[in-house]
Structures are given as C-alpha cells and as structure tokens.
Amino acid sequence: MATLGDLERTVMELLWATPEAMTANELRDAIAEAPSGEAGRELAVTTVLTVLSRLEKKGLVERERDSRPHRYKSVTSREDHTAELMHEVLVTAPDREAVLARFIGSVSEAEAETLRKLLGSS
Amino acid sequence: MFWASYLLAALAIILAWPAPIALSRASWPARAPFTAMVLWQSIALAGGLSMIGAMLVWGLEPLGDNLISASAGFIRILLDDGSAQTLGVVHVFAISAATLLFGHLVFTLALTFVRIRRQRRRHRDMLSLLSSPAANQPATLVINHPAPVAYCLPGGARSVTVMSDGLMDLLTQAELEAVLTHENAHLHQRHHLLLWAFAAWRSALPWLPTSQLAQHAVSELIEMLADDEALRHVDETTLVRAIAIVGSGALPSSRDALDDPLADAGRRAPEPAIADVSGGAADVQSIAHRVRRLLTPLPPLSRLQQGLALSSAGILLVVPPVLLVAPELLG
C-alpha cells in the first residue's frame, strides 16, 4: 500500500509531464495506466481528490475555477521547484568562477599553487 | 550582595566583548576544533547567565543578604504587596530587565526552534517530491540540479543527506565519499543543535559582538570537525579537491545566479534549518580556512594547552552560579 506521500509524488509527476490541466478522473486513469508497478492500480476518485487538495494546500497545484469537473495543473515546473529548493540551501548561488577566484585569492600564494595543481589534475 | 552583582557584571562585559574577540582572532581553534567549540559554548552560557544574574542580584539587594532569601522576599511582595517600599525604582527596573532578558532568551530559543522545524518539514516535503534515493547509499537522496551541492537535513531517524547530480558529475567516487562522510559527521555529531542554539543567541541579541562572532566561529568549527571525520576515510588531497569544487558553489548556468547580487555571499547568515551547506552560501573565508588547515596541517594542541582551554571553559560555567550564591556562603 502506497502512502499519501507516494501518491502525491505520482500525481505531481503526471502533472509535471502534462502541459494541459487534468481532471481527477483523468489522473486516476493515468495512475492506473502508469507503467511503474506500485502506481499501476485502481484508485477511487475521492482518493485522487484528497491528494489534489493536499497538494493545493501546499501550493503545488492549482485548480481552474470555471471548469466543471475541476481541472488541476501544477503551479510551476519541476525544475523551478528544484531551483527554489536549492536556492533555500545555497541562500545565494554566486557565480562559480568569481567565487573560486576570491577563494584562491584568500589563501597564500603557495597554497593557491597547490590548489591549482589539485584542481587541474582531474 | 553588591559586590557579587558587580563581579557578575564585570564577567558579563568580559564575555560579551573582549573574550569572544580574542577567541575569534586566535589561530589555535583550527588545531583543536572540539576544544574551541566547548569554549564558545561556555562563553555564551556564562555570558547570558552573568548578564541576567548581575541585574537580578543588584535589583534584589535591598531584600536580603543572599539570593534565596531575597527572592523569597520578592515573591512575598508580589503576592501581598507587603513592603514594596524597600525597593527603589532602579531596583524594580533591574529586576524587570533581568526577567525580560531571561524571557526574551527563552522565547527566542523556542521561536527559532519552531521556525527551523517548520522550514525543515517543508523542505523534506518538497524533497520527497523532487528527489530520488541514491543507489547503494542509505539515507541519501539525489536531486536534479546542475550546481554541485551537498547538504544534510537533520530530523532524527529521518535525517538525510542530499546531493545534486551536478555534484555527482563533477566529483570522483572517492571525492563523493569524502563529501558524504563529511555530511554524515554533521548528522552524527548533532551539529544542527549547536547551530540552532547559536542562531537563537544571535537573533536574540544581534547587537552583541559575542553572538555574531560565536555564530560565525561555531559554523566554521563544525565544518572542521566534519572535515576531520572525513579524513579518517579519505586522504587530504581528495578532501581538499572535494571542498574546493563544492565550495566554489553553483554553476553560472543556474537560474538563481542571476537573481542574487554576488556581494551578498558570505555576509548573510543562512538559517540553520539545513545543518550544513557545503556550497554557495558557505562563505569564502571559512572555506579558505578549512583548506589551509588541510593543506598545511598544524600539530594538534598539546595536552596541557587543551587542558587549559577546557578548564577555563569549566571555570566559566562554575563562576556565575557560585557568585550568585556566594554571599550566602560567606555569610
């Protein structure tokens, strides 16, 4: 039995892979057809809706208000989410070259030489 | 009790200003990071205790010969408004200030804890959607990102180390092992608790030199401790290469590189939600310290020097409580 977390992941992957918005019914069918073993199973539409509302609360999924039945789509792409997450980690992601230059600038000349040798030897 | 409050105040001032400055300028912490870490903790604890203690003892002075009878007297005043005449305005002010400072410190500690936990939970949630488990590495996740990033996310049994596939592309197997051992050392040695305490200390008293210097020193020392752990598994060259590659941060192609002014790097104190980030934000100066320490290793401190440092840490922790009760002991 997959957890809600696994289902969230499956649903997000489907939404990320599909350019247009999907209804809960379409998502259920897509999950049932998914090639991966654990995801390929029959789900109640209510389960899919529960997962979708959890994802909506987390700000990952948005619902198109006018359509009935509601159609859901991801708020941003997977890459954007990853970038955002890494941004949190890096706080600032400065330019690699500049940092390396400053980094080497702040060690002594002999150390910088050793370092250049080390980095060059790959 | 007056002299005790003056001694406590003197201690508070020394621990708030000259002591942390001297320790942050000393070069020996690189040779004995663990000892230096203990010393920083005792400076912070004893500093806070003597600050609060000095005001409390001074404010309660008219009510009794020692802290215990004076506190009892103060509680009596609070309960039935008895003999409040004995307390001057300045005394009431000192007692209130001590109480407020104590409350402020405890509250900030709790608030920081809640904030870090919330941030970690959100981060973990997102990771579960965006990352996949690493092949043949337990509790390790891989995320799709071009920047060479490795960090650990503490959370008891759910602690994980995360690395980007950008990192895996750039590093050899041995260098990857160095990075993973380094990150696991952070988790095993519970470095996130230290970061939490010192981050709270800093946000509670941001204007105090100790709090800034201590946070900076502590985040550098935990890196050295984790480096030392990694050195048990890989040689210096591998580790230095790994640090240099990871430490030089994100690739220019990364989307974020455009959003943030370079000038900010290193000056900002990152939230300690993620115990360690071996990349980008880690400021250049501390990476240089770490690399220098690995390239030209200095002998560790002698037993005598370590003993001296550790006993001063012990004395620092003992002195404020002793001063608090000393007037009673001496009659």
Image (cartoon, rainbow, N blue to C red):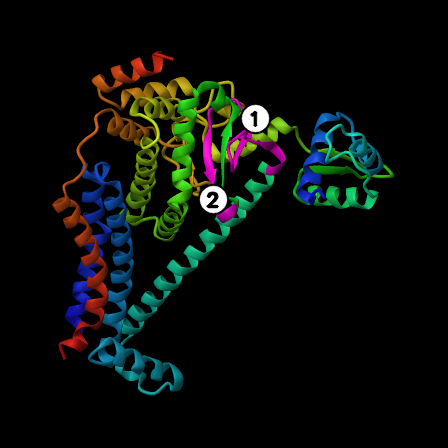
- B48 falls in the magenta region: no
Kindly report the distance in space between the C-alpha atoms of the residues bearing marks 2 and 1. 21 Å
Total marks placed: 2
Q: Name the residue under label 2.
A: B154
Q: Mark 1 points at which residue?
A: B144
Image coordinates of residue A87 in percent, x first then y, are 51, 32
Q: Would you say B142 lies left or right of B297 here?
A: right
> Numbered disc 2: what chain?
B
Q: Residue at x 29, y 58 (%)?
A: B48
* Callouts 2 and 1 in the same chain: yes
Q: Is residue B26 above or below residue A98?
A: below
**Corner quadrant of residue B97:** bottom left
Mark 2 Cα shell of 10 Å, populated few (<14), some (14-19), many (≥20): many
Q: Which residue is drawn at 50% across and 22% down?
A: B166
State the extent of the magenta-drawn residues as a range. B128-157
Q: Does the image show residue A91?
A: no
Image coordinates of residue B54 in percent, x first then y, are 24, 65
Image coordinates of residue B28 in percent, x first then y, are 18, 38
The residue positioned farthest toward the right in the image shown: A68
Q: Is residue A68 above or below residue B199?
A: above
> Numbered disc 1: what chain?
B
Front residue of B128/A68: it is B128
Image coordinates of residue B277 in percent, x first then y, are 42, 34
